[in-house]
Image (cartoon, helix red, strand yellow):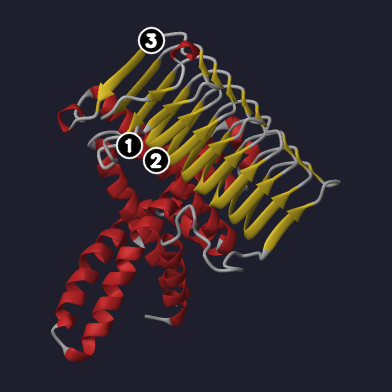
Amino acid sequence: MAKTRMAVLALLATAALILPGFVSAKGAGPQESVYIPKDEIVEGSLYSAGASITIEGTVKGDVVCAAQSLVINGRVDGDVICAGQSITINGPVGGSVRVAGNTIILNGAIARTAMAAGANVTISPQANIGWDALIASAYAEIRGNIKRDLYGAGSFFTLAGPVNRHVLLYMDDRQMPEDRSALTINKEASIGGNLTYTAMRDAQIENAEVIKGSVERKNLEWKNRGEAKDVAGAWAWFNLIGIFSALVVGLLLVSWLPKPIHDITDGMLTKPLPSLGWGILVLILIPIASLLILFTVIGIPLSILSIGTLLLLVYPSVILSGIAIGRKLNNALPFMHKWHNSLMAAMIVGIIVSRLIFSIPVLGWFLCFLALLWGLGGIWRYSQAKS
């Protein structure tokens, strides 16, 4: 295999390893840091990837980013769609917030919905969420004001702020000590509607009068996991986290490799059947060839490298298919024409649409497999052209 081909495959395979808390080394991104000062106004959307991103100024559009550390102190008029190791949002957001990472802190006013997936999620007393809050977290502390409903899934939840409507939580507390509750409702909290939660143990409610509606605990048992509501909840959270992860990898691909990604998806769109055919051949022939050379002593390292590279290319191949779908949609839909040249917009639209399609039972898995073959063939055809 030519050096160019190996370089492209290695870069794409490396990107597949990166998840929402992706940066563990300083300067791992395409930029060391991104800083928007207080007096600066970004007259559109901000797309960025770096080790550190700090926004003190104003962004008139959306913020789409991936960083080890993200701090937003300024104003964002649109949505915030970001992933990183540490995310702190202090300033007002005019749209929705969709973030994933290790530690997430929301301190500002969010006009619409807040969606956060992370190990630790904190909504401080200063936070004000205009619509709903959807939280997937091992440890979540909710002290801010939520104007509508609170949905959550995780291990520990502390509620110490007002929720104007209903609270619906799912907590897996089977491994917890029997004397410890997974849900704590402090006396500072208030729930305008019903509290419904799934757990093995009763919640610790300091003052029952803060809950205006009913309180219902559903038992967390294996036999209940097949029930429709539990399945629907698991489906929703699984796809939410899946979309976040895919957006991070897609952001890295289009930030680091815009020209190769553009050329690969061009080939996939102009010649979809040849790309699909090559994907089938690559998926069949590389494992067979690797197995054959495995029986020769000198071929063992090459066999391991070939299989490893193929496995690492699985995820970015599906991402590439999503980007190709996004490019097609941007050109086909009239209201998307102004973004038809934006690879970033194509990535966002395509990944969200494709992930929703892939989530369809049975048919979605088949279509996801076709997307894998299509993307894999696109990578192979591009590498052949560059060799």
| Residue located 47% across and 31% down the image | 158
Q: Residue 229's x, y, as percent?
A: 28, 23
Q: 145 or 207: nearer the eye?
A: 207
Relative to 52, say whether 246 is above or below: above
The reply to whether the C-beta atoms of the residues labelled 3 and 2 are less than 8 Å apart is no
Q: Residue furthest top?
A: 213
Disc 2: which residue: 355
Mark 3 residue crowding within 10 angstroms, few (<14) / some (14–19) / many (20+): few
Q: Residue at x 26, y 36 (%)?
A: 178
Horizontal and vertical percent position of residue 384: 41, 72
Marks 3 and 2, Cα distance to the nearest angstrom? 36 Å
Q: Quadrant of the C terminus?
A: bottom left
**Which residue is tagged 1?**
359
The label shown at residue 238 is: none
Q: Position of residue 213 (x, y in %)?
A: 43, 8
Report if residue 386 is visible in the image: yes
Quadrant position of the N terminus in the picture:
bottom left
Q: Front-most of 94 and 202?
A: 202
User: What's the CA distance linking mark 3 and mark 1?
Assistant: 33 Å
Secondary structure of residue under mark 3:
loop
Q: Residue at image x 32%, y 16%? A: 216
Q: Which residue is mark 3?
A: 214
Contact, mark 2 vs mark 1 (Cβ under 8 Å): yes
